[in-house]
Amino acid sequence: MAAVRGAFTNKLGFILAASGSAVGLGNIWKFPFEVGLGGGAAFVAMYMIFCFLLCFPVMVTEIAIGRKTQKNPVGAFTALGFKNWRFIGVFGVLAGVLILSYYNIIAGWAFGFFFEMVQGNFDVSNNFGVFTSDIVKVCIYAVIFMSFTGYFVGKGISGGIEKLSRILMPTLLLMIIGMVLYSLTLPNAFEGVKFYLIPDLSEINISIVGGALRQAFFSLSLGMGTLITYGSYLSKKDNIVSSAAYITLTDISIAFIAGLMIFPLVAFINQGDMSAVASDQAGPGLIFVTLPQAFATLGPTLGALVGGGFFLLLSFAALTSTVSLLEVPTAYVVDELGITRTKAVLFASIFIFIVGIPSMLGNGASEFFSNQFKITGSTDFLSFASKMTDTMLLFGGLCIVIFAAYVWKKENLNAELANGYEGYQHKGISKYLDFTISFVCPTILAILLVLVVLSNFFGINFF
Ligand code: PFF
């Protein structure tokens, strides 16, 4: 069975692929603008607390369920003998389809910006709306990106996803560190660092708490069974707890470093005035609008090099995430319908591309999809889909911990975690995980989920 489904070569391969899933647009595109909208360092502090307190235990649980059952997120619950809980997996697959449908569009923008930068077309940032509403261009880039994604997923686990991550993850890290060192040397860089790192606790309100939680789940690829799927390809000899710790730390570190790369650039462009981050340049356009202006000041050659490098880096980060998003429905179709991986990839990617059409049209090309989705406080379809899926991930995470602690039962979870971790039951970390999975995660996630839904969908804010 394992030979047919594929498997990671070793623990490092798994960690790199799962970190590749975690590190993506969420870290480099979304994290900085969420920090900007969320008032800076207060958001960063809350995001980190959520990662350790809530996300790490959910991640351990997801990987354990996957490895125990060697199944996709839907099949996993059936394999454990709890068919009624399959809805968690179904919900996860749906969330994955919806996330990839719009994620692929933004990844396509990043890839398109790479070409614009290397041609020295820095003006594209002043005309970002023109770029995103050029449906032919956006569609071509989205098709290219989905094709790359499908190609690597089609190649399987060790020969496709793992190989890609082994090359791209270290490359990405070197590129980001290079960019940070460069941006810290720019005039006014320190103002950006201050905004990013010195918290103003008076800024905290429910939308910021909810934003930090949603960001933590999205960034760590939790709540939709990606890590159930990746865990299903992990060997019984490998230590799940330490792998999850490495993945969490890698993801947090890269998000943190991405902030150190972007805020000094923003401060440089605005001559030290960071108020713009929370106003006109805020939101999804932050890196697409602000950064090319910084690259332009470097002159045509250096600007093309640094700007091209940045957007190539962003595309690489996105690719290791899109492959993980496509792997979930692919594994589902392969496991449950028994069709070949190639056919499953083809079917899933075409279907998801079609689901993404409203998001593609919703950035200027169509008045309806660009301005009529007022349901979540957003106006366009892409932001609406993104808020929907963020909420679905929280719901998924909540259901997964409740399932593991009270339905599958802690003893079974612990027995799975002890594979590859000798003496696990007697370690302090097992007490921490027991306590967080049974009490802290269900309670805090349930409360915050209700508050986030009330705030996002009904405009009711308690603080
Ligand atoms: N974690 C990815 C990012 O930060 O860009 C996005 C993502 C990938 C979310 C896979 C969810 C997922 F299952």
Image (cartoon, rainbow, N blue to C red):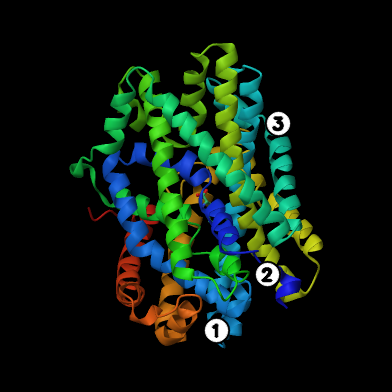
The number of numbered badges drawn on the structure is 3
Q: Looking at this view, is 113 or 256 the one in front?
A: 256
Q: Is mark 2 within 8 Å of ligand 1?
A: no
Q: Is residue 190 left or right of residue 13?
A: left
Residue marked by disc 1: 84
User: Looking at numbered disc 2 in the image, what kind of residue is underneath it?
Assistant: Tyr
User: Looking at numbered disc 1 in the image, what kind of residue is underneath it?
Assistant: Asn
Packing grade of label 2 (10 A; few <14, some 14-19, many >=20) is: many
Residue 368 appears in the rendering? no
Q: Looking at this view, is 109 or 409 the one in front?
A: 409
Contact, mark 2 vs mark 3 (Cβ under 8 Å): no
Q: Is disc 3 placed on a helix, strand or loop?
A: helix
Q: Is disc 1 placed on a helix, strand or loop?
A: helix
Indicate whether 379 appears above or below 244: above
In front: label 2 or label 3: 2
Q: Looking at this view, is 418 or 280 the one in front?
A: 418
Disc assigned to residue 137 = 3
The N terminus appears in which quarter of the rendering?
A: bottom right
Residue 401 location (% of width, % of height): 42, 74
Q: At 52% from the left edge and 37% from the top edge, which residue is drawn?
A: 174
Residue marked by disc 2: 332
Residue 107 appears in the rendering? yes
Packing grade of label 3 (10 A; few <14, some 14-19, many >=20) is: some
Packing grade of label 1 (10 A; few <14, some 14-19, many >=20) is: few
Label 1 vs label 3: CA separation? 44 Å
Q: Earlier in the sequence, mark 1 or mark 2?
A: 1
User: Looking at numbered disc 3 in the image, what kind of residue is underneath it?
Assistant: Lys
Indicate whether 184 appears above or below 386: above
Q: Is residue 173 left or right of residue 461?
A: right
Contact, mark 1 vs mark 3 (Cβ under 8 Å): no
Q: Is residue 72 left or right of residue 52?
A: right
Q: At 31% from the left edge and 20% from the top edge, which residue is drawn?
A: 272
